[in-house]
Image (cartoon, rainbow, N blue to C red):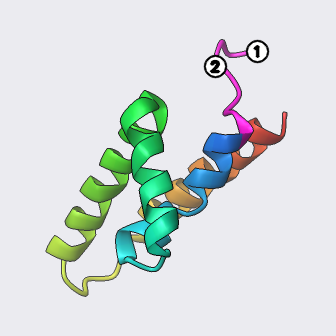
Amino acid sequence: MSGQRQTPARCRALLQELSEYLDGDVTPARCRVIERHITTCARCGNTLGRLRQTLAACRATGKKPLPRDVKARAAQRIRALLQQDRS
């Protein structure tokens, strides 16, 4: 094992909603739940911060297509994270 802890179920559920949260596509009640959680959970708060940085970087690049190697690395990392959570 790599020494990393498994993501708790409540965090996994929240992490799946972060994009909708940032887009304003969650109910006000769910928004409050998410905000309360990210203020008390460093892991989710950090993930949200990184996602905000990623979105800002994407918006800053405009409509330039991502290089093929960047897409491949991102897909590989996503697959690894999903596999880690299933372990």
Alpha carbon distance from label 2 to label 1: 8 Å
- Expressed as whole percent of the image width and height from the top left, the position of residue 61 reads 18, 74
The amino acid type found where label 2 is placed reads: Gln
The local secondary structure at tag 1 comes to: loop
In this view, 39 is above or below 67: above
Vertical order, 38 against 59 (above or below): above
Per the picture, the main secondary structure of the magenta-coloured stretch is loop
Which is more foreground, mark 2 or mark 1? 2
Q: Quadrant of the C terminus?
A: top right
- Residue position for label 1: 1
Q: Which residue is mark 2?
A: 4
Q: Residues within 10 Å of mark 1 (few under 14, many from 20)?
A: few
**Which residue of the protein is positioned furthest toward the bottom in this rendering?**
63
Determine the secondary structure under disc 2: loop
Q: Residue at x 68, y 16 (%)?
A: 2
* In the image: residue 29, left or right of residue 8: left
Q: Position of residue 9 (x, y in %)?
A: 73, 40
Q: Residue at x 59, y 60 (%)?
A: 75
The amino acid type of the residue labelled 1 equals Met
Magenta-colored span: 1-9
Answer yes or no: is residue 9 visible: yes
